[in-house]
Structure formats: C-alpha cells, structure tokens
Amino acid sequence: MGTISYILQKEFLQIRRNKMIIVMIILMPIIQLIILGNAADYEMKHINLHVIDRDLSTTSRTLVSKFRASSYFSIVNSSFDAEVADRDIRNDAADLIMEIPHGLERDLMRGEQAPISLRVNAINGVKGGLANAYTTQIIQDFNGEWLSDRYPGRAVVLPVGIAWSNWFNPGMNYATFMVPGILVLLITIVGVFLSGINIVREKEMGTIEQINVTPIKKSQFIVGKLFPFLVIALVELTLGLGIGRVIFGIHYVGNVGLIYLFSIVYLIAILGLGLLVSTITETQQQAMFIAWFILMVFILMSGLFTPIESMPRWAQIITDFNPVKYFVEVMRMVLLKGSGMSDISRHFGIMALFGLVTNTLAVWNYRKRV
C-alpha cells in the first residue's frame, strides 16, 4: 500500500498542476450536461404545414383550424396548386403537405369516406414519422367530433377503448429520461480519454523510463494510475446528480447509494479499458483516436438515442458487450423505477466480469522496459 500511495500522490499532484485537466473533467461536463439535457428532446414542435384546401367548406375550415390551434404545427402556406406545395417541400419550407379534396363535406354528409392526401418530407425519418403520427391523431380527433355533431342524440363509441397512464415519468418529461443517460456518457468519455492518454503522456514526457527502473509492480502501477480518475469520476457523478435534481427537477425514487456502488464497478471496468488503450499506443494522438473510435460505437449502441429493440439482431448481440448500455439501464432502473439490488444483479455481474478482463489485460500488456 505504501508504494501505491506514492504513485497516488504523484498522480494527484500532476492533476492539480494541470489546470486544463480540471476544466476538462469538471467544468466542461457540467456545461455539456446542462445544454444536452435541455436540447435532447424527441418531441417535435413547429412542424411546417402547407395546406391545399380544394373544398373550401365549413368542414374543411374546421379541420384546418385544428392544425392551426395545435402547438405542434405551423401553417406556413396555403394554395390550390400542388406544384407550389411540392416546391415548398423540396425547398424545406414545408415539412408536410395536407391536400383536402373537393367534395369533402359532401362525401361526409353522405356517409362516404373522404380521403385526405398527406405528403411528408421524410429526409429526416424521425421528424417525418412524428409529423405523420401527429397529423393522424388530429384527423382521428376531428372524425370523432364530427360524428358527435352529426348525430347529437347518439353517443359515438369507438370499437376499442383505451385507458392509459405513464409510469415512472408521468409528465413525459424528456429531461427525466435523457439526463441520467447523458450523465453516463459524460463520465464515460472523461474516464476513457483521461486514462487512455495517461501512460502515453508518461512516454512522451520521458518519465516512463524513470518509473520503469523503480521496484514498482505492474499491478501497483495500474492501480495508482486508475484510482485518481475513479475519484474524479465519482465527484463528477455527484455534481451531475445534483444538477439533475436542482436544475431539471428530477425526483430520484431509488437508492442513490446503489448507483454509487454500481458506478465504482463500472468505472473500474471503463478506466481499465482506457489504460489498456494507453498501453498499446505510443502517442497521445493514437490513444485519443482509438478511444474515440471505441466511444462512438459504445455511445451510438448504448440505447440512449436509439432503442436497442429496434436494432437488427446482429447489432443487439453486439450491444451485449457494450458496458455503457448496462450503466444507462441501471441509472434509469434505479433512479426512475426504484429498482433494487436484485433487479440489477445481472448488470453487476456482467460489469464485474468486464472490469476483470480489461484490467487484467492492461496489467498483462504493460511492459516494464527501459
């Protein structure tokens, strides 16, 4: 323990003297968490709508007024010419074209179907899908109201009734859903990058030779390199949880201590990965490039931005080896659902195995040579 304590003193002194590292590991993640927590929102608003109303009836105007009253749509233009509307959608002036045919009111009064044409700009698949879903919902509500007005003495009963409620996030607040996951990503990025360039920095500065000639075991050297960043990451986690509670108003229903316990296991695993990268590279540029490549795969396949269930089967198998996926799941399960140790025991086991593998490889791959 005495040998490791000297290494720890050296590491903390180096961190304290490098003011830029303090900014990178404390200030920048906090700013990123605040910005991304407010910006990461899957709800679409202000969808630009171009209306072609060929009926010009009371019914068609009522339908258009439904879209005008919605906070999701902005009617940017209306015309009688399909070419004008097509030009708007090609120029990105409109996201959606709704064409109401001539005879809409007449057909509805006769009890016949009156098809409405929707043309969606789907170059952004997510935005196009949501625009289509919002439009369909408004038209369905309009159908129900029209039938009620048409047959005032008869109750309109839909074939299938729906009674719904939102569990764990009643207000459907995206910050509640995204902030815990974004905090995981920021901790991971800082941990992998800083540990990834740590040993390489010693090589470039020429101090690695001085360390190699000392009677320090490889395992002691790796532990001494890992522990300071573990402490720093836990401090960053504490600040992030505080920001989520104070700024975003997230109510944590689970045991926060369980989050810290899992975080320690997770950070040992992810810092071991960074140190492994550091042992196989010779320059900081190489280490950062490899670390960035790994992180991009981890982040995009973590399930934070894209549901894992919607990925191809082969991609879902790959995510089983992604440590970020497990921490994102644990954060949401514990903080939002109130899950206990029994619920995340599998995640603990997988992460402990991942940490054992990465740190063993880091110790084994580090060569003490002059």
Image (cartoon, rainbow, N blue to C red):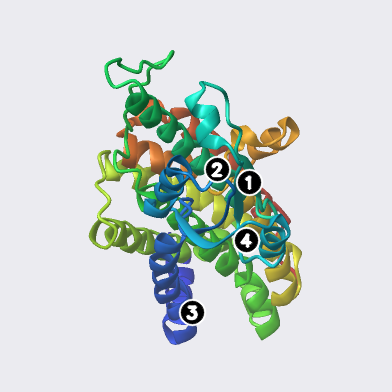
Front position among marks 4 and 2 = 2
Q: Which residue is tagged 4?
A: 275
Q: Is residue 98 above or below residue 217?
A: above
Q: In terms of image quadrants, where is residue 222?
A: bottom right
The amino acid sitting under disc 4 is: Leu
**In this view of the protein, which residue sits in the foreground, 305 or 134?**
134
Which residue is rendered at x = 72% and y = 76% of the image?
Answer: 285
Where disc 1 sits, the SS reads loop
Where disc 2 sits, the SS reads helix
Front position among marks 3 and 1 = 1
Residues marked 2 and 1 touching at CB (< 8 Å): yes
Q: Which residue is tagged 2?
A: 325
The amino acid sitting under disc 2 is: Lys
**Neighbours of disc 4 within 10 Å: few (<14), some (14-19), many (20+):** many
> Where is residue 88 drawn, in percent x and y?
66, 64
The amino acid sitting under disc 1 is: Met
Q: Relative to 92, is 179 on the left or the right?
A: left
* Separation of residues labelled 2 and 3 (CA atoms): 27 Å
Which quadrant is home to the N terminus? bottom left
* Separation of residues labelled 3 and 4 (CA atoms): 17 Å
Residues marked 4 and 1 touching at CB (< 8 Å): no
Q: In terms of image quadrants, where is residue 165?
A: top left
Front position among marks 2 and 1 = 1
